[in-house]
Image (spheres, rainbow, N blue to C red):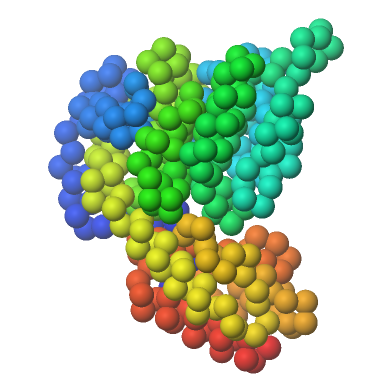
Amino acid sequence: MIDLRSDTVTLPSPEMREVIANAEVGDDVYGEDPSVNQLEDESASLLGKEAALFIPSGTMGNLVAVLTHCERGAEIILGNKAHIFLNEAGGAAALGGIHSHTIPNQKDGTLKLDDIKKAIRYDDIHHPRTRMICLENTHNMCGGVALTVEYTRSVGEIARDHQLKLHLDGARIFNAAAALDLDPAELVEPVDSVMFCLSKGLGAPVGSILCGEVDFIQQARRIRKMLGGGMRQAGLVAAAGLFALKHNLPLLKDDQRRAQDLARGLMEVKGISLMDKIPPSNMVYLDLDPEFSLDAVQMKAKLKEKGILGGIEGERQMRLVTHLWITDQDIADVILGIKEITAEG
């Protein structure tokens, strides 16, 4: 199968498996796993932060950040299309008693600065206290768009002016850096904390990293333990993360080139239209035109018959995500398969 459902479907390469098998390990809860310690140090350095924490998943990483920055009854400001709001099982509310104040995401993934300012509560005993602003980069539900340094700095200024924390869901921050041709540390400089995933475009089997100041990470380590995220000989998976940062990080530009090749091939296909003619990162969102006879569920089934797996994002919308295991030939085969299906429909 050519699997374009997500970049989470990547598998460890033989070389990564060898590194996993030979990893030096210890008890990470005691702080004695050398591979984990190295991964945390290298991750913090890569993003220009003081410290980092290895966490089982991106969802847990975001939740740990929210619980560390906010007390019960506090409020966070985030977009109505944010992953934290839509796809993390309401963890902030269920486990932290933390209220989400959503404002509209714009097409480019941003939140209007005036909307952010208006959402900040003034001091009143009737109101929850605003404690944090959350951004997402790249922004999944806005087509994989990358937020600019200038925009993130503007939000950072608002946060500082109002004594708020700024957290970045940077699950795909390295895709954003590749798209903008920037040092990832520059992209995250304005934020107090940032989470990134090792198990998406970087191709590791599991794990995410949370970065921030030393005091923040020390408290986050306690929260991770509370949530059941303390792992013992975690160096086996940390070693995969180290391999990914060294060998797979430079390959993200290939994923984005292939996404653009896919979009160019689909641009003139009858019956579909693209959210972005030039995909902003490694995601191609396509809409099935109203006159086209198939909906997204039916189109997905037709693609599967041709050995292609795609993701459904709406009644007539699909998402195709390029990643480490997608080749140029795969892209050509997908374009041909979709052309054949639309010709039949």
Is residue 90 something one can see in this rendering? no
Residue closer to the observer: 211 or 229? 211
Q: Is residue 246 visible?
A: yes
Q: Position of residue 185 (x, y in %)?
A: 37, 35
Residue, x 21% and y 58% (percent of image)?
A: 14
Q: How many marks?
A: 0
Closer-to-camera residue (167/314):
167
Q: Residue at x 73, y 82 (%)?
A: 292
User: Considering the image in quadrants, where does the N terminus appear?
Assistant: bottom left
The residue at 59%/56% (across/down) is 143
Residue 251 image position (x, y, % from top left): 31, 57
Q: 178 and 62: which one is in front?
A: 178
**Quadrant of the image occupied by residue 225:** top left
- The correct choice, above or below, for 38 with respect to 11 in the image is above
Residue visible at 29% across and 53% down in the picture: 250
Looking at the image, the residue that sits furthest to the bottom is 344
Percent coordinates x, y for residue 170 in the rendering: 48, 39
Q: Could you say which quadrant of the image residue 300 lies in?
A: bottom right
User: In the visual, does 304 lie left or right of 270?
Assistant: left
Left or right relative to 270: residue 184: left
Q: Residue furthest right?
A: 126
From the image, which quarter does the C terminus lie in?
bottom right
Q: Is residue 177 above or below residue 39?
A: below
Residue 29: give x, y in percent of width and height: 33, 20
Left or right: 301 in relation to 176: right
